[in-house]
């Protein structure tokens, strides 16, 4: 992630999943919440890169489509989701 420069990090999983472990610095906004797009638009700058992830990549792909339609310029979907993130 350091190579990406200033990137915003969004976890689109449920609070329970987030509580079980998450990437440091990630903001949680549950994809299943009815106001997901509105809350994300309020929390993040649409002009800056936004990296997002879910558990395995399915929800984040759906979230990417919704956020692109909402005007986010650059979205990076963490392939494989949290499951693919190296654990220490």
Image: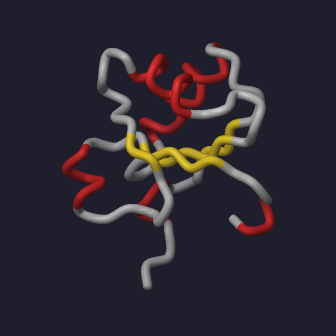
Query: Quick check: 56 above or below 64?
Result: below
Residue 26 in the image, given as x and y percentages of width and height: 48, 54
Residue drawn at (51%, 45%), measured in percent from left and top?
A: 10
Residue 41 in the image, given as x and y percentages of width and height: 56, 23
Q: Quadrant of residue 44?
A: top right
Residue 18 in the image, given as x and y percentages of width and height: 30, 54
Number of marks drawn = 0
Residue drawn at (25%, 53%), measured in percent from left and top?
A: 17
Quadrant showing the C terminus: bottom left
Query: Quick check: 76 above or below 72?
Result: below
Residue 74 in the image, given as x and y percentages of width and height: 75, 35
Query: Quick check: 53 above or below 47?
Result: below
Question: Is 48 situated left or right of 83 in this image?
Answer: right
Residue drawn at (80%, 66%), measured in percent from left and top?
A: 3
Q: Residue furthest bottom?
A: 88
Residue drawn at (42%, 36%), measured in percent from left and top?
A: 59
Q: Out of 23 and 39, give the one closest to the viewer.
A: 39
Question: Is 65 situated left or right of 30 in this image?
Answer: right
């Amino acid at each position: 992630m350091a190579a990406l420069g200033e990137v915003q990090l969004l976890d689109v999983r449920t609070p329970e999943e987030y509580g079980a472990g998450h990437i440091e610095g990630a903001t949680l906004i549950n994809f299943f919440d009815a106001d997901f797009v509105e809350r994300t638009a309020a929390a993040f700058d649409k002009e800056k890169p936004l990296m997002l992830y879910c558990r395995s990549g399915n929800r984040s792909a759906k979230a990417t489509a919704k956020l692109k339609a909402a005007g986010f310029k650059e979205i990076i979907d963490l392939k494989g989701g949290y499951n693919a993130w190296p654990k220490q």
